[in-house]
Image: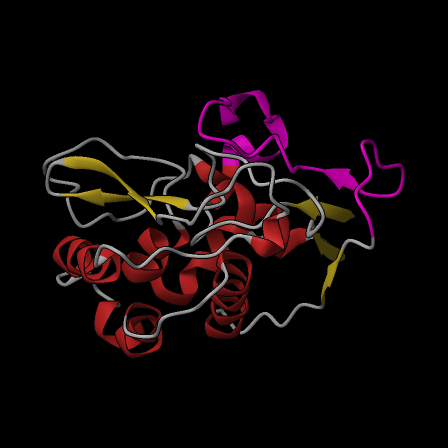
Amino acid sequence: MNILLSTAYWPNLHYFFYVLNAESIFIEKHEHYQKQSFRNRTQILSANGILNLSIPVVNNNKQIITDIEICYKENWQKNHWRAITSAYKNSPYFEFFEEDIYPFYITQFKYLFEYNFLQLQLILKLLKRPKSIYFSDSYEITTEKKLDFRNLIHPKINVENDESVATAINTNYYQTFSSKFNFTPNLSILDVLFNMGLDTLKILEN
């Protein structure tokens, strides 16, 4: 299975299901930036429920995704790390991965695309599942040799419509606030990583 994905900030389980089960992974680098998507947004489970963490970006009108710059006028990195720490500091594997994740919140990366790509590489390294990742050569409206998920993994699209992945991402696993909330599926990969460690693979791999 060859797949084509958009870039994403700490991608969710829907995204990683395809990453882990694909033969070849292509990331779209010639599309225009899309607001209100997972390209600069991730979702974690906080003490108050689902929390959206969004990376602010510099003027993004009709810019190519690789040209999108991260904005640092506000200290969003400090706020995101505080939120992640508050949500997962008591999770079983937070201390095992904290040192690897933290540098993304003290280093100022210029471009969103690079920031996201390095995160993707890190997660695959932590899960001990090396993958070759390629970039698109040009923008194609339709693709013949790749399954196109660029616009299908989106906050406004119900993942239940994707039967091949719905079973996997709805598999219950321990969550830090399980005593407070019903199981919350399809969160950021950080949620399952901090709570399940390498058992993440048992949930997502076919």
Callout count: 0
Q: Kindly give the residue lying farthest to the bottom in the view shown.
A: 99
Q: Residue drawn at (79%, 43%), measured in percent from left and top?
A: 139
Residue 103 shows in the view: yes
Q: Is residue 194 above or below residue 128?
A: above
Q: Residue drawn at (51%, 27%), measured in percent from left and top?
A: 159
Q: Residue drawn at (46%, 41%), measured in percent from left and top?
A: 38
Residue 1 horizontal side relative to residue 16, left or right: right
From the viewer's side, name the closer residue of 116 and 204: 116
From the viewer's side, name the closer residue of 42 and 175: 42
Whether 62 is among the magenta residues is: no
Q: Kindly give the residue lying farthest to the right in the view shown.
A: 144
Q: Which residues are magenta?
A: 138-167
Residue 46: x and y in percent read: 17, 44
Whether 141 is among the magenta residues is: yes
Magenta-drawn stretch, dominant element (helix, strand or loop): loop
Q: Residue drawn at (33%, 59%), measured in percent from left and top?
A: 196
